[in-house]
Amino acid sequence: MSDFRRLPNLAALRAFEAAARHGNFSRAAEEIHVTHGAISHQVRALEEELGVTLFVRNGKRISVTPDGERFAETLRRALAEIAGAADALRVDARGKKLTVTALPSFAARWLSPRLGRFIEQHPDLEVMLQSSGALTDFVRESVDIGVRFGKGNYPGLATEKIMDDHYYPVASPRYNGGRLPRTPQELAGSTLLRCEMEPWTPWFRAAGLDALEPTGGLVFQDSSMLVRAAAEGHGIALARHAIAMTEIASGELVRLFDVTVRCPDSYFLVCPPQALQKPQVQAFRSWLLKELEALPAL
């Protein structure tokens, strides 16, 4: 059995973990709501107690030593377990709440229109949908589960690939007075709308075009805004299927040509490992997978 009398000061451990994660004493101090000096003092005391240098200090800049990084990783896992256990013991009302995070484009275009069906099946559950492009700190922000679009590299989280996606050009049926291009070659001269993270070049190559990546004009940071601009007739967008399917189904957008390019990224369901035991997380996962199974083929 461990001798907990030898355990270092918990406040110092938390201060060190935050400083190691941020690589900065000031940001660690802001997170824990103490002063910069308090963080520095606690870390110094911890180093003296352990007899190990945890940070290399160069003026106001700090960097974590290899020993410090290994210790910080162990602390992160331990603190996550403590936070998860504490969350499980909170009042019963917490068990009737589910917090979901997703990219703004996916949340607005795909998830939000369908979420009502999940709520109908679980009327006693309070569902909070957060839209964020940043990878959430699930434990600190009390987020239960999230949908992310990427390569699937999410350290410390349970990760499940749920869907691939494809790009293809879309336009409003009103664009250019209804005179839409009938072949990829006829795209020349059209206004091509662009999203910051989704270049046209791979689709050009798949369509057999030697065209260069479009330049100039408005560049959208969010796929949802890109799709809305196309639906309003401002140009032709290279859209992800999951983001554009609602407007295509309603007739606001039409798909051009039959050339598609698979996205290099995919959609993943992610959550802290301990959250997989929560009934509301299990229910959301089951519902989401059934919704995906019901999607028509591309």
Image (tube, grey):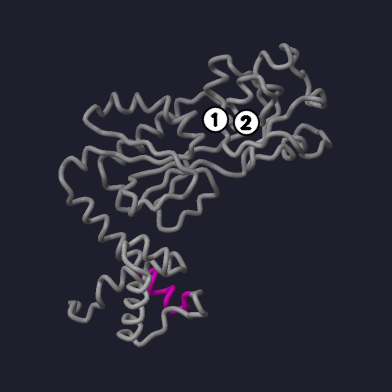
Q: Report whether 126 appears left or right of 130.
A: left
Q: Which residues are magenta?
A: 63-74
Q: Position of residue 141 (x, y in %)?
A: 34, 50
**Quadrant of the image occupied by residue 190:** top right
The residue indicated by pointer 2 is 239
Residue 43 in which image quadrant: bottom left
Q: Amino acid at mark 2?
A: Ala
Compared to 197, does 59 lie above or below? below
Name which residue lies at 18% across and 40% down.
Answer: 93
Q: Secondary structure at mark 1?
A: helix
Magenta span has 235?
no
Name the image quarter holding the C terminus: top right
Q: Residues within 10 Å of mark 1 (few under 14, many from 20)?
A: many
Q: Which residue is mark 1?
A: 243
Picture residue at 48% right of the left edge, 40% below the top: 103
Label 2 secondary element: strand
Q: CA distance from mark 1 to mark 2?
A: 7 Å
Q: Position of residue 187 (x, y in %)?
A: 78, 25
* Residue 111 occupies quadrant: top left
The location of residue 47, given as percent across then percent down, is 35, 83
174 and 208: which one is in front?
174
Q: Nearer the viewer, residue 220 or 188?
A: 220
Relative side of 198 to 127, left or right: right
Residue at horizontal 29 percent and vertical 24 percent from the top: 120
Q: Which mark identifies residue 104?
A: none
Mark 1–mark 2 CB contact (< 8 Å): yes
Q: Amino acid at mark 1?
A: Ile
